[in-house]
Amino acid sequence: MTIKSYNFYSVEKYLMSNTYYVPDYQREYSWVTEEQVQDFWVDLTDLILHERENHFLGQIVVHEDMETRRKYIIDGQQRSSTSVIFMSVLLSLFDELCKETGKEAARNKVEDIRIQIIGRWSEEENDLKFHMGKIDNEFFRNYIQRSQPFPEVIGESSHKRIQSAYNFFYKQLHSILEKVPIDERYDTLVTYYRAFKDRFTVMYVETDDMNEAFIIFETLNARGKELETADLLKNHLFKIAASQINDVKNKWLCMQNQAEGIELTKYIRTYWNANYPFTRERELYKHLKRHVTNSAASIQFTNQLVHNLDVYKVLVDPQNESFFADKEVEMYIRNLKMLSASTYYPLILAMYNKGYDEAQIKEVLKAIESFIVRNCVIAGRVANKYELTFSKIAQQVSDKQLSVCDILGEMRVDVITDEEFESYFVIANIKSAPVAKFILRKIADYEQKELIINPSNKDIHLEHIMPKKLGKWDVSEEQHQKYLHRIGNLTLLADEYNTSIKNKLIYEKSETYRVSKIEMTKKLANVHEWSASTIEERQRELFDIAKRVWPAF
């Protein structure tokens, strides 16, 4: 185990010295123009404006694979690829100046950047100095390193970020050049070129041992930013994979490619809490290192991450993802998503891993919906309070494979009683329109089983019987605020919805209510006075149905 090289280099020396590869398992290009790319530009302009001696861009950790004789960037691929993008912009602008002015020095700069820093490529030879990972390599090669025009349509998100970074740098420099006389433009561009290549510096560390490379990475990122957590976890899995590292890499890359839009750290933590003692995110890396200690464990853990991903994606985004054959399972998941519930995820992953069938999962999801409605929506208890509850049950499922009856029994310990549910329900306010629609729709569906209300919140309207704007209503402001969002003051309208009635008095709304297909609304047609007492009375009536819709299982 040796560190072959350690030094501080200028960006130019770093990029010129070797040919570098980004491992396929690394993240795709992720710097965002409005954030890291703009910071990059601000640092450069500040360096020039204040004539500072240098700017430290960050560390570069490289593993030289002794079998392939390639140098792989373990840490620093984002700053490295952005540096190449910036050099590509400089090359394009020097080339434009050369064509515009015929200045030989501009042509020389084009050749210097092309040959010494970026490198050349053709179908017969590949002398490029920098190679991106699998997802970005071809796009980066064609449109950054070979300077081809960007395509009109770009699919991959990382490719869009690469183009955005290029366009941002080009726009900034082009704007500066346009403001100076044409005979000064070359010198102005050279100022930015030299400031970047000579005075932006990196700390370069190279080792021929992959474990050493990961240890260095972890040490340098010990205080790491939140976004480094998943990378640290990944690098630990690779580090202890030993001879199985290619299998682990491929599995990780497979998961990463399928996890578009998923926060990997949250996913890994959810999987962990489904199978192992509960941990907070800040402790996740420490616990995983203690648990995954050999190549077999690394492969098994990575396989499980791939295996669980599709189920997790449905939990996180049930509107756009699908996995279960029984669509009622996904209906309950959509309901819980609308209620902003997520603490239950580990329990569903644990059941899936242990081979529970969909009917069993549906039964538990139905109970979870009751749990969340009773405890969180109506009683107002903080959902995060139950994160540990669901994780503990999930771990028991993983360890003992509890029966569904036992799972419900474990949940029942924390669910509020019918008496408590009633005491909270009869005074409950619901200010969230989607949640109010859901509660009323479920009650209405139970009340009139022959007609199920459209589950789409877009096609159903929430009616405040005592309206948001009082108009002719003779109600004090205090009473208006107290009762406006009470469940008893709310109902649903479907096709009969008419915006012209929303601020009218109750008896003026009667005809609209009378033609409603929704029974709870139709009943209001015979009500001609609306007061605090009628709201309270109706809310108690709705509770009589709610306790059957969401029982304490």
Image (cartoon, grey):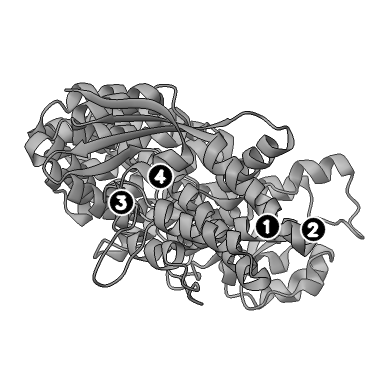
Q: Given the image, on which type of amino acid does mark 1 rest?
A: Tyr
**In the rendered image, which residue does mark 4 sit on?**
15
Q: Is residue 238 left or right of residue 322?
A: left
Mark before the other along the chain sequence, 2 or 4: 4
Q: Residues within 10 Å of mark 2 (few under 14, many from 20)?
A: few
Image vertical order of residue 322 relative to residue 307, above or below: below
Do the numbered discs 2 and 4 sit on residues whose CB atoms are within 8 Å?
no
Q: Given the image, on which type of amino acid does mark 4 rest?
A: Leu
Q: In this view, does 514 lie to the left or right of 144?
A: right
Distance from Cα at disc 2 to Cα at disc 1: 10 Å
Mark before the other along the chain sequence, 1 or 4: 4
Residue at the spot 39% in from the left edge and 28% down from the top edge: 281
Q: Residues within 10 Å of mark 4 (few under 14, many from 20)?
A: many
Do the numbered discs 1 and 3 sit on residues whose CB atoms are within 8 Å?
no
In the rendered structure, find residue 201 and report the number of the disc placed on it.
none
**In the rendered image, which residue does mark 2 sit on?**
180
Mark before the other along the chain sequence, 4 or 3: 4
Q: Is residue 546 left or right of residue 428?
A: left
**In the rendered image, which residue does mark 1 sit on?**
186
- The local secondary structure at tag 3 comes to helix
**In the rendered image, which residue does mark 3 sit on?**
256
| Marks 4, 3: nearer the viewer | 4
- The local secondary structure at tag 1 comes to helix
- The local secondary structure at tag 4 comes to helix
